């Protein structure tokens, strides 16, 4: 008996990388603000968030290899009027990684320390400065979970061990987050100096967000305590931040401190938060920001 349509359909929906990329694109394009009943939450109105551009499948120059590489998606969100000063921009570099949820990505980490609790954003003035939001006010909160290592799982044909770490599979994850960082570099540089997007007008602010999106149920976290023992049982999550402390190679000096791993559901949640809540933007572009001590 030959293969059935249902069996082919299952393989396509679970394992086709192109289909996963399309689902990520649809999540970005179809995002809408949350509908919330009751008071107590400050929404984006009267200045709504706008999705200005969604780019798919272009190329960028890898600053390490000096070769052209392909990115998956780039998305630009902003609050304010296009072309006017004072607008705030969130630039998203989104890479897609299709994994079998039965063999998920496991992000291992611990509680975030103060030295990892900061983020930078760009302030477009004549000098083009980098601003830093430090521990206490950063969107990357001290003492919250942060990833420090990733493990890909693989099945083992042994009676006493069903799953093990897949080291060769981990390189694919590193490649994806490297592409997200390289694409983020292009977005930051281009917004300052006129590539990728038009340069941002004077007095604009821009935060760059590298993202890797997995299928639903394909992302787990495992948290260690200070003693190296698991603080809790590993659990599935929709969003997980991973510390990288990546310094961009142009002036002003800007650090991309975290990669955002998320599932499709997590991407939808992230877009809803950005489109719905003023507090999300206020925390990203905090009034407590000071010139980055690393700025050159």
Image (spheres, rainbow, N blue to C red):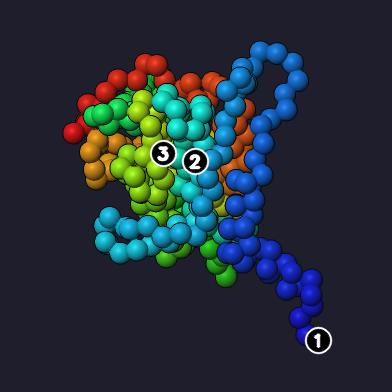
Q: In this view, does 15 lie above or below 247?
A: below
Image coordinates of residue 281 in percent, x first then y, are 50, 25
Name the residue beneath numbered marker 2: 76
Q: Is residue 53 left or right of residue 131?
A: right
Q: In front of the other: label 2 or label 3?
A: 2
Circle nearer the N terminus (3, 1): 1
Quarter of the image for residue 269 reads top right
Q: Distance between the residues labelled 3 and 1?
A: 53 Å
Q: Is mark 2 on a helix, strand or loop?
A: strand
Viewer can see residue 220: no
Image coordinates of residue 198 in percent, x first then y, are 40, 43
Q: What element carries label 1?
A: loop
Q: How far apart are marks 1 and 2 (CA)?
A: 50 Å
Image coordinates of residue 115 in percent, x first then y, are 31, 28
Circle nearer the N terminus (1, 2): 1
Q: Is residue 3 above or below residue 61?
A: below
Name the residue beneath numbered marker 1: 1
- Residue at left offset 36%, top offset 52%: 182
Mark 2 touches mark 3? (CB < 8 Å)? no
Residue 208 has which mark?
3
Of 99 and 118, the residue lying toward us: 118
Outermost left residue? 296
Of 295 and 13, the residue lying toward us: 295
Quarter of the image for residue 238 reads top right
Q: Is residue 217 left or right of residue 142?
A: right
């Amino acid at each position: 008996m030959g293969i059935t349509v249902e069996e082919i359909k299952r393989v396509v929906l679970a394992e086709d990388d192109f289909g996963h990329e399309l689902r990520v694109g649809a999540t970005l394009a179809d995002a809408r603000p949350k509908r919330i009943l009751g008071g107590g939450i400050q929404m984006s109105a009267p200045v709504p968030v706008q999705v200005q551009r969604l780019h798919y499948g272009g190329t960028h120059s890898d600053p390490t290899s000096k070769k052209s590489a392909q990115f998956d998606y780039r998305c630009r969100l902003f609050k304010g009027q296009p072309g006017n000063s004072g607008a705030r921009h969130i630039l998203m570099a989104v890479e897609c990684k299709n994994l079998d949820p039965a063999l998920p990505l496991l992000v291992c980490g611990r509680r975030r320390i103060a030295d990892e609790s900061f983020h930078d954003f760009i302030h477009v003035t004549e000098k083009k400065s980098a601003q830093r939001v430090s521990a206490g006010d950063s969107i990357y909160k001290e003492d919250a979970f942060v990833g420090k290592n990733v493990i890909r799982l693989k099945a083992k044909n042994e009676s006493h061990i069903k799953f093990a770490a897949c080291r060769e599979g981990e390189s694919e994850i590193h490649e994806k987050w490297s592409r997200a960082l390289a694409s983020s570099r292009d977005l930051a540089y281009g917004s300052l100096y006129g590539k990728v997007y038009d340069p941002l007008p004077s007095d604009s602010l821009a935060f760059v967000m590298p993202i890797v999106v997995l299928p639903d149920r394909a992302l787990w976290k495992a948290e260690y305590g200070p003693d190296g023992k698991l603080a809790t049982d590993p659990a599935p999550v929709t969003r997980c931040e991973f510390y990288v402390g990546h310094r961009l190679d142009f002036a002003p000096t800007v650090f991309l401190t975290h990669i955002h791993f998320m599932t499709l559901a997590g991407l939808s949640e992230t877009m809803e938060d950005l489109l719905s809540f003023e507090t999300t933007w206020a925390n990203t572009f905090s009034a407590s920001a000071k010139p980055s001590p690393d700025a050159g």
